[in-house]
Image (spheres, rainbow, N blue to C red):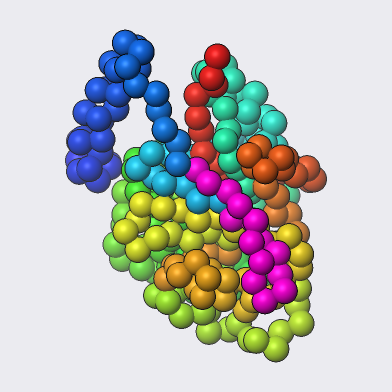
Amino acid sequence: MKLEGYFPRPMFNAISKIKAALILLMLGLWTPVWALECHDDRYLGNSYTVCSADLTRDDLRLFLYDEDGKPFGSFSAVNQSLSDQGLKLSFATNGGMYHDDRRPVGHYIERGRQIMRVVPNSGPGNFGLLPNGILCIGLNWVRVIETLRYQRESPNCAYASQSGPMLVIDGSLHPKFRAESTSRFIRNGVGASADHATAVFVISNNSVTFHEFASYFRDVLGLEQALYIDGNVSRLYAPSLGRADSGRRMGPIVGTVTPVQN
């Protein structure tokens, strides 16, 4: 398989930069700079925590199964696995909807290998509230893409996770969201910047409606594409804020990885 057909062409320039950085690192002449930022915010009476990853500097990945084929299920399990490689999570959140056995409900790719196909049809629950979408992560880029567009364009994702519904599509809120809705839950989601360099993850700290949550992505963060990840199972790992939410075991987990500093 040709690499050009697997990752975008920027991968080759990125590899050269990585090799150069590794040489400088071994010589003690360079210290890596990680761009991840987390902060709390308020909008229209609701509280949110926002974590932004710059894909040109941050290593964003999805995690589902360990080396034995068992679901990680928790942030601590992912961290334990990473520690054997001299790495750790600097941020993480649940990364997509899943069945009781923690298999992904929709499309899922990890390290270039497809584990679950795209599910394009409507169905029950939030996942089936079309249009839904896919978080697609490349080596140094990220996109949030509506599912049917994803199928048409077939982007080369190193990692991908399908969820739904879309919160913001091309700058417009999902057509089924209503300002007068009374359905409130803790919710988390992800948006991508127009230049595909930044992934912005948001978790509400109080129960919010879909309309309120989507409006925050569009009107405050200025993101034209955003995807709902999940509801009451939503949890956040953000050491910089002293957060390591616990709860029931998760399916896919998405997070940024950094080296352990000795």
Number of disc labels: 0
Per the picture, the main secondary structure of the magenta-coloured stretch is strand
Residue 39 in magenta?
yes
Residue at 46% from the left image edge and 80% from the top image edge: 172
Q: Quadrant of the N terminus?
A: top left
Quarter of the image holding residue 171?
bottom left
Residue at 45% from the left image edge and 68% from the top image edge: 223
**105 over 61 or under it: above or below:** below
Magenta stretch bounds: 36-50
Hey, which residue is sitting farthest bottom in the picture?
180
Hey, which residue is sitting farthest front in the picture?
29
Q: Is residue 156 visible?
A: yes
Is 133 on the left-hand or right-hand side of 73?
A: left
- Residue 100 rendering spot, x and y as whole percentages: 73, 49
- Residue 134 rendering spot, x and y as whole percentages: 46, 59
Is 56 on the left-hand or right-hand side of 50?
A: left
- Residue 206 rendering spot, x and y as whole percentages: 76, 64
